[in-house]
């Protein structure tokens, strides 16, 4: 799939990995829709990227708002790329299944984290794929588009206290191959990135000691990943036509300890 001249929808595009991906794809010639709950920051990114970039405010959990982002992409040209990056966790979702004092983890916290990450990603995927399926094939493989989901290595070896977040990301990992098979007849590839510890803006607020401890656990290179490295991998998952149903770890060979 060619990036230059086509349209990319980036969820969570106003910050972190999403912003880096929006910048990267724009630099490669794509027109970009930045879809994010933070309208102000989304517009700042769109203004930075200039012509061919638009901001749409909304939530990946809202069908109408997500469809509006897909429709906005269609006004720019052919929506050939969707980067489903929006997600996260809340304080209410952090904790053991049963705490040391016998209190079970909040069901609401667990459910909201699964909904935000897994359900939100699926909502983005299904609406983006529906739009792509209406396009003419873009190449001699009959390809119409590519979707790149975002999981986490917590979906493989989540730590103590990450049962909600890890379960949600494990769901995205599992969904990727099934969606790729579902969408094969439409000529749409589906891949996924499972990042480890990435140096996004949020880590700038963390104590330096915490960051140094985590960096020391990365075999090589002994640092956090750069958001631009995430974006570069996303580019490869788009442009390599034979990569389909694939989950790529981006983690410097780290494997999370139990805690």
Image (cartoon, grey):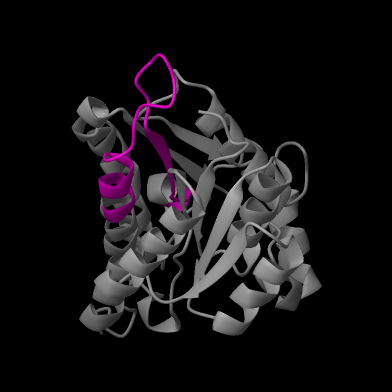
| Closer-to-camera residue (221/23) | 23
Toward which corner of the image does residue 30 lie, by quadrant? top right
Query: Taking 139 as reference, is 197 left or right?
Result: right
Q: How many marks?
A: 0
Q: Give how far across and how far down residue 85 sits, in percent.
A: 48, 57
Q: Give how far across and how far down residue 13 sits, in percent.
A: 57, 64
Toward which corner of the image does residue 121 lie, by quadrant? bottom left
At 63% from the left and 57% from the top, the residue drawn is: 52
| Closer-to-camera residue (205/84) | 84
Query: Taking 238 as reference, is 145 left or right?
Result: left
Q: Give how far across and how far down residue 83 sits, in percent.
A: 48, 50
At 35% from the left and 30% from the top, the residue drawn is: 245
At 60% from the left and 74% from the top, the residue drawn is: 42
Q: Give the residue furthest to the top.
A: 140
* Bounds of the magenta segment: 127-154
Answer above or below: position of 137 versus 170: above
At 43% from the left and 79% from the top, the residue drawn is: 90
User: Residue 52, can we see it?
Assistant: yes
User: Residue 225, can we see it?
Assistant: no
Query: Taking 69 as reference, is 172 left or right?
Result: left
Q: Is residue 135 magenta?
A: yes
Q: Give how far across and how far down residue 114 sits, in percent.
A: 29, 66
Answer above or below: position of 223 versus 167: above
Q: Is residue 95 magenta?
A: no
Query: Taking 49 as reference, is 6 left or right?
Result: left
């Amino acid at each position: 799939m060619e990036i230059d001249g086509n349209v990319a929808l980036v969820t969570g595009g106003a910050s972190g990995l999403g912003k880096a991906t929006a910048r990267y794809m724009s630099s490669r010639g794509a027109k970009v829709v930045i879809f994010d709950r933070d309208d102000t920051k989304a517009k700042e990114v769109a203004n930075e990227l200039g012509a061919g970039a638009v901001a749409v405010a909304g939530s990946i959990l809202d069908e109408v708002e997500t469809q509006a982002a897909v429709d906005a992409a269609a006004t720019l040209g052919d929506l050939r790329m969707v980067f489903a990056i929006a997600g996260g966790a809340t304080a209410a979702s952090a904790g053991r299944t049963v705490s040391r004092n016998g209190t079970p983890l909040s069901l609401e916290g667990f459910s909201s984290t699964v909904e935000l990450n897994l359900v939100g990603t699926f909502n983005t995927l299904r609406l983006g794929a529906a739009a792509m399926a209406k396009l003419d094939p873009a190449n001699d493989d009959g390809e119409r588009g590519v979707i790149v989901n975002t999981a986490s290595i917590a979906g493989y070896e989540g730590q103590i206290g990450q049962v909600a977040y890890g379960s949600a990301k494990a769901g995205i990992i599992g969904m990727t191959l099934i969606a790729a098979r579902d969408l094969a007849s439409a000529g749409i590839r589906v891949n996924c990135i499972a990042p480890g510890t990435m140096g996004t803006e949020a880590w700038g607020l963390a104590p330096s000691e915490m960051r140094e401890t985590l960096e020391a656990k990365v075999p090589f290179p002994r640092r956090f990943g750069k958001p631009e490295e995430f974006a570069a991998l996303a580019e490869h998952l788009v442009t390599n036509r034979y990569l389909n149903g694939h989950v790529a770890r981006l983690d410097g060979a780290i494997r999370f300890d139990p805690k």
